[in-house]
Image (cartoon, rainbow, N blue to C red):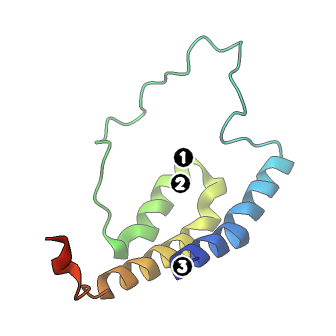
Amino acid sequence: MSDHEQRIDRFFDRHLLPLVNVLEAAGVRHFPAGADPGVESYYRAPDDPAPALKTIEPTELAADLTALWATADPALLPLVEPLAELAMDLREEETEATLSPFIYVMF
């Protein structure tokens, strides 16, 4: 298992799983386990006609997530800082990676 995978597993175990357990104990479900026969349609018009994709600057990730989740789903706010830290750590490693001397074999 790579270092990236270990870090993601730790994030899951330390942050996501405990939050899910707390939310489920409170009766909160983010994703239904199955179709609801009483619902005619799952379509919902977007609240904000903002573009579907947005470039997020790494230094602004925590602020952007906080702004989004504060109104959309405050239960996710405890994930902001650890998720931003994980993203920055993984991004720094990615940018520090060196090009393999064997890359010419691919061309």
Q: From mark 2 to mark 3, how far is it between C-alphas?
A: 30 Å
Which residue is located at x 70 percent, y 19 percent?
36
Which residue is located at x 32 percent, y 42 percent?
52
Q: Which amino acid type corresponds to the residue marked 1 in the rendered image? A: Ala
- Residue situated furthest right in the rendering: 25
Crowding near the residue tagged with mark 2, few <14, some 14–19, many ≥20 C-alpha atoms within 10 Å = some
Q: Which mark is residue 2?
A: 3
Q: Position of residue 40 (x, y in %)?
A: 60, 10
| Residue with the mark numbered 2 | 69
| Residue with the mark numbered 1 | 72
Callout 2: SS: helix
Mark found first going from the N terminus, 2 or 3: 3
Crowding near the residue tagged with mark 3, few <14, some 14–19, many ≥20 C-alpha atoms within 10 Å = few
Looking at the rendering, which quadrant does residue 87 occupy? Answer: bottom left
Q: Which amino acid type corresponds to the residue marked 2 in the rendered image? A: Trp
Quick check: marks 1 and 2 in contact, CB under 8 Å? yes
Which residue is located at x 35 percent, y 76 percent?
59
Direction from residue 60 to residue 51 in the image, left or right:
left
Q: From mark 1 to mark 2, how far is it between C-alphas?
A: 5 Å
Mark found first going from the N terminus, 3 or 1: 3
Q: Quadrant of the N terminus?
A: bottom right
Callout 3: SS: loop
Q: Position of residue 9 (x, y in %)?
A: 64, 71
**Tag in front: 3 or 1:** 3
Quick check: marks 3 and 1 in contact, CB under 8 Å? no
**Tag in front: 2 or 3:** 3
Q: From mark 3 to mark 1, how far is it between C-alphas?
A: 33 Å
Q: Which mark is residue 40?
A: none
Q: Is residue 7 above or below residue 32?
A: below
Looking at the rendering, which quadrant does residue 8 occupy? Answer: bottom right
Callout 1: SS: helix
